[in-house]
Amino acid sequence: MRKFLVIAIAALSMAFVNISAFAAGWTPPGPIKLLIAFRAGGGADTQARLIAEELEAKLGW
């Protein structure tokens, strides 16, 4: 049972690596709307604003 579990985890991780390789070449066709489900001023909001600034600088939107 344990060997099966290890093989299953390895197979799933390899599948996720392949999926992320396909997504690496994707670029959004236009501006991205970032929606945060927490109130303004919290940690999630601050992180989202920092990420948005980096995306804006990188993509020019």
Image: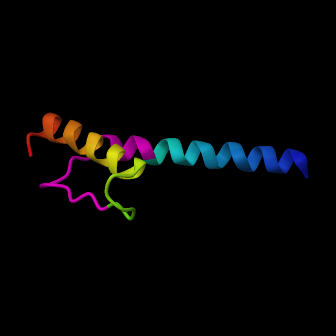
Examine the residues drawn in magenta and state their main secondary structure: loop
The extreme front residue here reads 41
Q: Residue at x 19, y 52 (%)?
A: 28
Per the rendered image, the range of residues in magenta is 20-35
- Toward the viewer: 30 or 4? 30
Q: Position of residue 52 (x, y in %)?
A: 23, 45
Q: Which residue is drawn at 33% across and 40% down?
A: 24
Kindly indicate the quadrant of the structure image that contains residue 35: bottom left
Whether 25 is among the magenta residues is yes
The extreme bottom residue here reads 37
Q: Which residue is drawn at 36% across and 62% down?
A: 39
- Toward the viewer: 48 or 18? 48
**Figure check: 23 above or below 37:** above
The extreme right residue here reads 1
Q: Position of residue 46 (x, y in %)?
A: 33, 45
**Figure check: 47 above or below 1:** above
Whether 41 is among the magenta residues is no
Q: How many tags in the picture?
A: 0
Q: Residue at x 29, y 42 (%)?
A: 51
Q: Where is residue 56 in the image (x, y as percent from the top left)?
A: 15, 41
Q: Where is residue 13 in the image (x, y as percent from the top left)?
A: 61, 44
Q: In this view, does 11 lie to the left or right of 37?
A: right
Q: Is residue 12 left or right of residue 53?
A: right
Colouring:
rainbow
- Toward the viewer: 47 or 33? 47
Q: In this view, does 17 lie to the left or right of 52?
A: right
Q: Is residue 27 left or right of residue 45?
A: left
